[in-house]
Amino acid sequence: MSVSQIISQWQQRPFERGVTDCCAFVEYVVNTLTGESYLPHYREDFQGVIDEHGSLRDAVSYYMKAQPIPADELLPGDIALVDIMGHESIGILMETGMIAVVLEQTGLRDVRPDFTDEGWSVGH
């Protein structure tokens, strides 16, 4: 199954932390793609997870057990760290080069690759 097919199976629902946010979306795609689970289930305490590690970048690095790599080394299905006007989120690099990401106000969207400088390989 392609990355785009997996993304299209994501059930679009109203945004809810820990259920239908960027981390839940990324976990869904990566788990479907690789059979591995990396990110924690946290429900309401997302800020506690981020605060424990200092930033979203550091939290994802901790759970992925790897430091991010440059964006130009990412492959479709890898996790991209997205920064839009100072707001960090994580998404999935698609075959088109765009990044699928769940944003708080708008849900699942495609964003241009120039909103990311780095991300994490999922080794698929």
Image: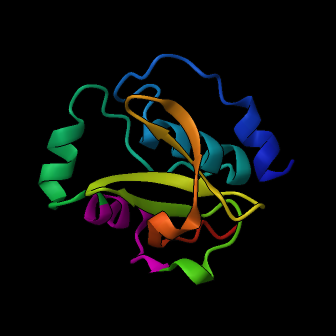
Kindly report the secondary structure that dominates the magenta region of the rendered protein.
Answer: helix
Q: Considering the image in quadrants, where does the C terminus appear?
A: bottom right
**Position of 6 relative to 55 (above/below):** above
Boundaries of the magenta span: 57-69
**Position of 6 relative to 112 (above/below):** above
**Position of 88 relative to 107 (above/below):** below
x then y, percent, for residue 41: 37, 35
The image's colouring method is rainbow
Q: Kindly indicate the quadrant of the structure image that contains residue 78.
A: bottom right
x then y, percent, for residue 16: 38, 22
Q: Kindly indicate the quadrant of the structure image that contains residue 28.
A: top right
Using the image as rendered, state which of residue 50 and residue 115 is in the foreground. 115
Q: Is residue 21 left or right of residue 8?
A: left
x then y, percent, for residue 97: 70, 65
The residue lying furthest to the top in this view is 14
**Position of 46 relative to 35 (above/below):** above
Q: Is residue 43 left or right of residue 55?
A: right
Q: Kindly indicate the quadrant of the structure image that contains residue 32.
A: top right
Using the image as rendered, state which of residue 93 and residue 41 is in the foreground. 93
Q: Residue at x 77, y 61 (%)?
A: 95
